[in-house]
Image (cartoon, rainbow, N blue to C red):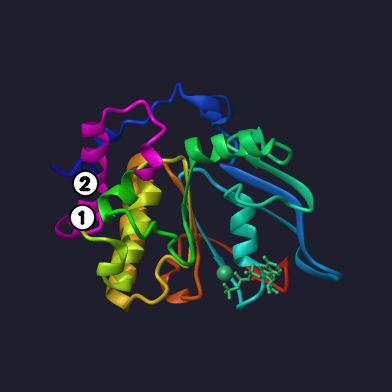
Amino acid sequence: MNTLNDPQSFAYDQTAGPILSAAAEPAVSFENLSKTYRMDRIEVPALRGVSGQIERADTTFIKGPSGSGKSTLLNLLGLLDRPTGGQLTILGEDVTRLSDRAAADFRAQHIGFVFQGFNLIPVLSVRENVEFPLLNRKMSAAARKDRAMEYLDAVGLSEFVDRRPGEISGGQRQRVAIARALVSEPSLVIADEPTANLDTKTSREIVDLMDRVRTELNTSVVICTHDTDLITPDSSVIHIIDGQTAKE
Ligand SMILES: Nc1ncnc2c1ncn2[C@@H]1O[C@H](COP(=O)(O)OP(=O)(O)OP(=O)(O)O)[C@@H](O)[C@H]1O
Ligand SMILES: [Mg+2]
């Protein structure tokens, strides 16, 4: 059974974490965020004071030219990297200065991330890759397996679960990465070019799937994309040019 079609099974635990206490607040807000990469003597100011919000249970698209700072911003929002300056609040918690350990815990509990290059583990099967984010959860092995299978079914990969990432197509790998980001049912899903390399029909299906999860789990979704055709008229858009937010 695919419980993605059964909203009851996804009734969100409103008592968990900081979510209830900050119900009216956006899922993410960032103020004057900056990030300068330092390599030897060279400094690359990738983000230069970016402010914005990601609303709860909304889909926000981040668009902008190559090299404009989109992945840099997503990495900061996903707690994969630290800002050089500014402030970041996620689910009501100021995460700007969390220790590395606390940031990793926060990320594991609340954030699902689809990487621009997938980052699948080559020696694990498709199913094991999807189970991976659940390994630290208090779940039985059988429950973990069931949950992984449910999400692999949702992305149309039930028949490929025993293959390794090297034995499936690029588009299928992308769908594995998406199942892995969703499987922990996080409050915030961040996807960096989740539909790059996919044909138009599959891209639309992937965005529709993320939209369904958003509605059923009240997830906030952030999608960075070059493909402006995917941006639906009612979604929020953050436009980044040259490390700064641009006016529409
Ligand atoms: N680890 C890094 N070290 C040094 N410079 C970096 C690093 N990552 C990104 N940059 C630089 O920061 C700027 C922004 O890069 P970023 O990857 O955020 O762009 P992007 O908008 O995601 O581009 P694309 O659409 O091509 O994925 C670029 O000038 C890039 O070269
Ligand atoms: Mg990028």
Within 10 Å of disc 2 (Cα), the crowding (few <14, some 14-19, many 20+) is many
Q: Residue at x 42, y 73 (%)?
A: 196
Q: Residue 145 occupies which quadrant of the picture?
A: top left
Tell me if residue 241 comes above or below residue 81 in the rendering: below
Side of 99 relative to 90 (left or right): right
Q: In the figure, is residue 209 to the left or right of 67?
A: left
Q: Is residue 141 magenta?
A: yes
Spot occupied by residue 247 in the image (x, y as percentages of width and height): 69, 69
Q: Is residue 15 above or below residue 159?
A: above
Q: Earlier in the sequence, mark 2 or mark 1?
A: 2
Label 2 belongs to which residue? 149
Task: Indicate the position of residue 131 as horizontal and vertical percent values.
Answer: 32, 44
Helix, strand or loop at label 2? It is: helix
Residue 185 visible at all: no
Q: Is residue 185 magenta?
A: no
**Mark 1 and mark 2 in contact (Cβ < 8 Å)?**
yes
Looking at the image, is mark 2 or mark 1 nearer the viewer?
A: 1
**Relative to the observer, which residue lies in front, 248 or 109?**
109
Name which quarter of the figure residue 134 lies in. top left
Quarter placement of the C terminus: bottom right
- Residue drawn at (19%, 60%), measured in percent from left and top? 160
Quadrant of the rendering where the N terminus is positioned: top left
Say whether mark 1 is within 8 Å of ligand 2.
Answer: no
* Residue 143 position (above or below residue 85): above
Q: Which residues are magenta?
A: 132-160
Residue at the spot of label 1:
161
Which residue is at the far right?
Answer: 41
The Cα atoms of the two marked residues, 2 and 1, are separated by 8 Å
* Horizontal and vertical percent position of residue 121: 39, 56
Q: Secondary structure at mark 1?
A: loop
